[in-house]
Image (spheres, rainbow, N blue to C red):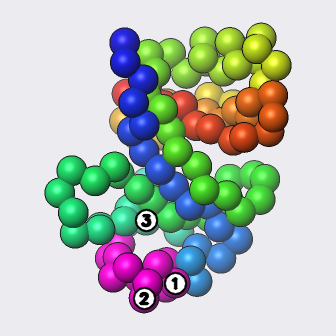
Amino acid sequence: MAHPVIHAEIRSTDPDATRTFFSELFGWLYSDGAFPGYTFVETGAEGAIPTAIGPLQGGKDSVLFFIGVEDVEATLARAVELGGTILQPAQQVPGVTFGVFADAQGHAVGVAAN
């Protein structure tokens, strides 16, 4: 399986201010997401990587990208074997399972599977 970047998101302590900033900077519009305070970005560009802005889900403000995998839990386990740490264990929301790990240098990366 190829492992493309399939999703990106900005996690913010103040998602409304973050949305306002990027709306004024890039003209982005927003539609409702999977849970309160979480919105999907409408960039106006066809084929853009799905991107969202939402509240923190633990941790601190961050920008994440998510890589498509077949098995989120197995990928998180392998990341730990390679010296990484799990920042957000595998969890399911409608239509997707996802998790977040940090590599051995502390870079946060998400993984997701449909």
Neighbor class of circle 3 (other Cα within 10 Å; few <14, some 14-19, many 20+) is many
Indicate whether 16 appears above or below 66.
below
What's under tag 3, amino acid-wise?
Thr
Q: Which residues are magenta?
A: 19-30
Foreground: disc 3 or disc 2:
2
Residue for badge 3: 39
Rate crowding at label 2 as few (under 14), some (14 to 19) or many (20 or more) other CA atoms within 10 Å: few
Q: Position of residue 32 (x, y in %)?
A: 37, 66
Residue type at tag 1: Phe
Comparing 53 with 91, the one in front is: 53
- Which numbered disc covers residue 24? 2
Q: Is residue 48 above or below residue 37?
A: above
Q: What secondary structure prevails in the magenta region?
A: helix
At horizontal 60% and vertical 56% (from top left) the residue drawn is: 63
- Residue 103 visible in the shown view: yes
Q: What residue sits 69% from the left and 41% below the top?
A: 108
Q: Earlier in the sequence, mark 3 or mark 2?
A: 2
* Residue 100 spot, x, y in % from top left: 65, 36
**Quick one: SS at disc 1?**
helix
| Residue linked to disc 1 | 21
Residue 87 on image: x %, y %:
75, 37
